[in-house]
Image: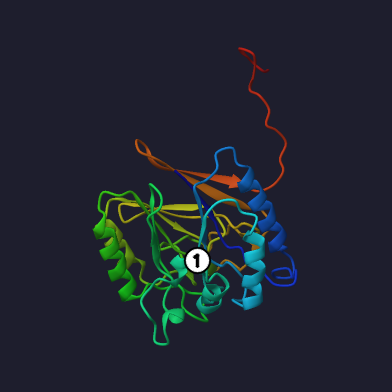
Amino acid sequence: MILCQISDLHIKAQGKKSYRVVDTAASLRRCIEQVNRLRQRPDAVVFTGDLVDFGMPEEYAALRELLAPLHIPYYLLPGNHDERHALRAAFSDHAYLQQGGAGKDGIEDARIEYVIEDHPLRIVALDTVIPHSSKGELAASSLAWLDRVLGEQPQRPTVIVMHHPPFKTGIGHMDDIGLADPQLLEQVVRRHPQVERVLCGHLHRPIHVRFGGTIASTCPGVSHQVVLDLDPQAASQFVMEPPGFQLHMWDTDAGLISHTAYVGEFDGPYPFYDGDNLID
């Protein structure tokens, strides 16, 4: 099985650019075209949050139109730029978004947390969103739900997907808006060794950390990247480094093998050999 991860889309309505610089719609179009052209087509795509920029219905309408050409089943989860009710309304035909325990005003306010059982690799989605905040958290009920869900199929290889990464990155301004109390999640994950990976977004960079007996990682942004500045006082800045996505291939012998792919047109491919001879 191949699971494609795309993150931090930040789609705006009416062709507006994010931060007045980034044409996020054009970036997503290029990414979707490239994913559709992959020689080994992924079995599923997961979008790990910050789907739109301000959580507005018109942004989700634009997102839905941009995703229409994707030829692969896909799953959405929110990030700190998203709004649960508007997301659910725009993708009302996505049954998994309607799961979850009822919030104080009904299902539309409940966290978007679900399990996808349709693939050899089980996908468990967590919602880390705090409304009107850039920071993330997992509710006690979410951690209890995760523990129960993982305990139901202890032999089934599983990935957990979420927006805020549960680890320090060293990029100060991003750590300031990270996940609260990540050790609580780590305690749950450590009890379930079938968890192959914790896949996250939010950081707009590929980062990998040992976590809870497995690996937690982040995905590059599909449009723009956070500046690589490992200073606790790092300025909040982005850079137009190459956009990317990740492919996570499940192999029964090797486990989960992850690759980062870059979106764009690049020279090549060129052969290493001319017949049996290495090209000098």
Q: What amino acid is found at the position of numbered circle 1 in the picture?
A: His
Quadrant containing the C terminus in the rendered view? top right
Left or right, 191 with respect to 87, comes to left
Count residues near mark 1 (Cα–Cα under 10 Å), then give few for <14, some for 14-19, many for 20+: some
Q: Report x, y in % for residue 131.
A: 49, 80
User: Where does label 1 land, which residue?
Assistant: 94
Side of 90 where 212 appears, left or right: left
The answer to whether any part of residue 11 appears in the image is: no
Q: Residue furthest top?
A: 276
In the rendered view, tell whether residue 219 sits above or below residue 131: above
Q: What element carries label 1?
A: loop
Decide: is 37 above or below 14.
above
- On the image, the x and y values in percent for residue 108 come to 46, 80
**98 or 142, nearer to the observer:** 98
111 over 4 or under it: above or below: below
Toward the front, the furthest residue is 93
Q: Where is residue 87 in the image (x, y as percent from the top left)?
A: 54, 73
Q: Which of 271 and 178 is in front in this view?
A: 271
Q: How many labels were placed on the picture?
A: 1
| Coloration of the structure image | rainbow
Residue 142: tell me if it is visible: yes
Image quarter for residue 28? bottom right
Which residue does the image show at 66% across and 64% down from the upper left? 65
Between 22 and 146, which is closer to the camera in this rendering? 146
Quarter of the image with the N terminus is top left
